[in-house]
């Protein structure tokens, strides 16, 4: 695999996991979430109403 084919994944401390897009997220129940954005925020705290995508709900976390 060349460097051009690799995706960048960047965990944000206390926040989401940022993934260079576009991405396809395959959930454990078999559903698929596609995003064509150039950078995708994937929820790491499971508080997002738009899970698996981040809606910044982690900011209200105490």
Image (cartoon, helix red, strand yellow):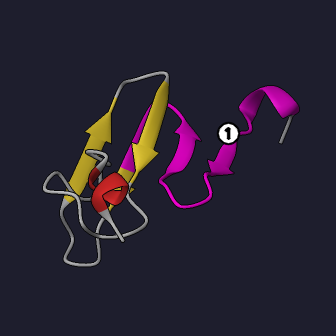
Q: Is residue 36 above or below residue 58?
A: above
Of all residues, the one furthest to the left in this rendering is 49
Judge from the rendering whether residue 61 lies leftward or rightward of residue 48; answer left or right: right
Residue shown at the point (73%, 33%) measured from the top left = 5
> x and y percent of residue 50 in the render?
17, 51
Residue shown at the point (83%, 42%) measured from the top left = 1
Q: Is residue 32 above or below residue 37?
A: below
> x and y percent of residue 2 in the render?
86, 34
Residue 41 inside the magenta-drawn segment: no
Q: Is residue 62 above or below residue 38?
A: below
In depth, the one of 1 and 24 nearer the eye is: 24
In depth, the one of 30 and 61 nearer the eye is: 61
Residue shown at the point (32%, 34%) measured from the top left = 35
Name the element at disc 1.
loop
Judge from the rendering whether residue 1 lies leftward or rightward of residue 29; answer left or right: right
Q: Is residue 44 above or below residue 36?
A: below
In depth, the one of 41 and 15 nearer the eye is: 15
Residue 10 inside the magenta-drawn segment: yes
Magenta-colored span: 3-24
Circle 1 Cα neighbour tier, 10 Å, few/some/many (<14 / 14–19 / ≥20): few
Of all residues, the one furthest to the bottom in this rendering is 28
Residue carrying label 1 = 7
> x and y percent of residue 28 in the render?
28, 78
């Amino acid at each position: 695999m060349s460097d051009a084919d690799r995706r960048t994944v960047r965990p944000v401390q206390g926040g989401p996991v940022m993934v260079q897009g576009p991405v396809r997220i395959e959930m454990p129940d078999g559903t698929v979430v596609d995003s064509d954005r150039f950078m995708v925020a994937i929820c790491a705290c499971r508080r997002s109403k738009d899970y698996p995508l981040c809606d910044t709900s982690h900011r209200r976390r105490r």
